Image (spheres, rainbow, N blue to C red):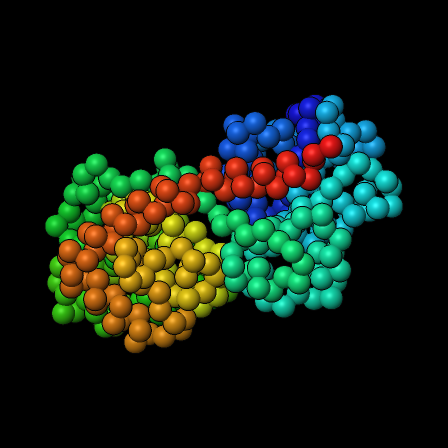
Amino acid sequence: MADIRNVEVIAPNFKRRLSGVTSTIIQLIPIQRALGEKIAVLGPGLPDTLPSIRFRDLLRLWSAPDGRPCRVWHARRNVEMLPAIVLRDLLGMKLRIVFTSASQRRHTGWSKFLISRMDAVIATSGKTAAYLQVPNTVILHGIDTKRFQPPVDTAAAKAALGLDPNQKYVGCFGRVRKQKGTDLFVDSMIGLLPCRPGWSAIVAGRATGPHVAFENELKERVAKAGLTDRIRFVGEHTNIPDWYRGLDLFIAPQRWEGFGLTPLEAMATGVPVIATDVGAFSELVVVGEQETGAVIAANDLQAMVEATAGFMDDDHRRTLAGANGLGLTRASFAIEGEARAINAVYERLMRP
């Protein structure tokens, strides 16, 4: 438990169920603290390893920390903006509020009102920024480039996963559901693999609730095509960086996405990426000169087949794109860069 007197930034998490927002908080807080930010979390659903404060500690917010005119409250959901507005505007506590938006749609009137009351707004992509009607700072997500990195020996990495070291593998990782475009990936593989015996495919991720039937239907399609041994559904794994290291090509086939980290995770592992034009994918994947992969229209099976064939059939192109992606993620998308940019927003708000 953190001492509120030594906390300058509060990161609330008012949702028990694990989500992308929760995962972002879990990954960023230790990095931000390592960079010198005095930040602590508030709320349920977070690991005990993170420094946290209690709700009763909020009574101390009438007093500012030493050397600061206020504290910062970093909200990422509507339910986290509202109490901060009450604390600041109705109770007169010494607080300034930051909101991070990942939404890529028109905001409701209620959301617009809450956002209008913020002291600073962060957008996670240029597309997100276009939907905001207030000044904002674009800060793209980053990833842990120490956790996601290329294998020393690709054949050994494949063998460790029970894969054939002599096969090339194309992967699709994430929740198995229609929104994620898993069916597009499977259908493209059914069209491409029969005439490419050196390639196989991996679907890594979990289907939950109503999506289990969707996954079972996809497995039936694969079986009917006679490709059960070459399009593998491996389920959800905690060692997902190891599965990236077993790939030669990655596809992000989503129909919709808020941001989407999988292309960055693949590129950080030296794997070229084919991604649909959703979320922040077009801001992550470089096409043309210095390409790291390709960006295609969402929900376009033919475009996916053509783009995938182009990389499957060109070893040199894959090698070059993989190297470009590795360099790009290390230079521009390390999570430390994201943490520094966010900390800079805090510092501007806490200047005397």
| Residue at (32, 52) in percent of width and height | 234
- Name the spot of residue 40 as percent of width and height, x first: 64, 32
Drawn side of residue 83 relative to residue 167, left or right: right
Q: In this orientation, which residue lies closer to the viewer: 352 or 53?
A: 352
| Residue at (54, 52) in percent of width and height | 138
So how many labels did they put on this image? 0
- Name the spot of residue 341 as percent of width and height, x first: 54, 41
Drawn side of residue 220 relative to residue 119, left or right: left
Q: In this orientation, which residue lies closer to the viewer: 134 or 185?
A: 134
- Name the spot of residue 74 as percent of width and height, x first: 66, 43
Q: In this orientation, which residue lies closer to the viewer: 41 or 264?
A: 264
Q: Is 220 above or below relative to 2?
A: below
Q: Quadrant of the N terminus?
A: top right
Q: Quadrant of the C terminus?
A: top right
Drawn side of residue 311 relative to residue 259, left or right: left
Camera sees residue 42: no
Camera sees residue 301: yes
| Residue at (30, 45) in percent of width and height | 326
Q: Is 275 above or below relative to 326?
A: below
Drawn side of residue 287 relative to residue 257, left or right: left
| Residue at (15, 63) in percent of width and height | 313
Q: Is 97 above or below relative to 321?
A: above
Name the quadrant containing residue 108.
bottom right
Name the quadrant containing residue 109.
bottom right
Name the quadrant containing residue 36.
top right
- Name the spot of residue 164 as percent of width and height, x first: 16, 49
Q: In this orientation, which residue lies closer to the viewer: 269 or 294?
A: 294
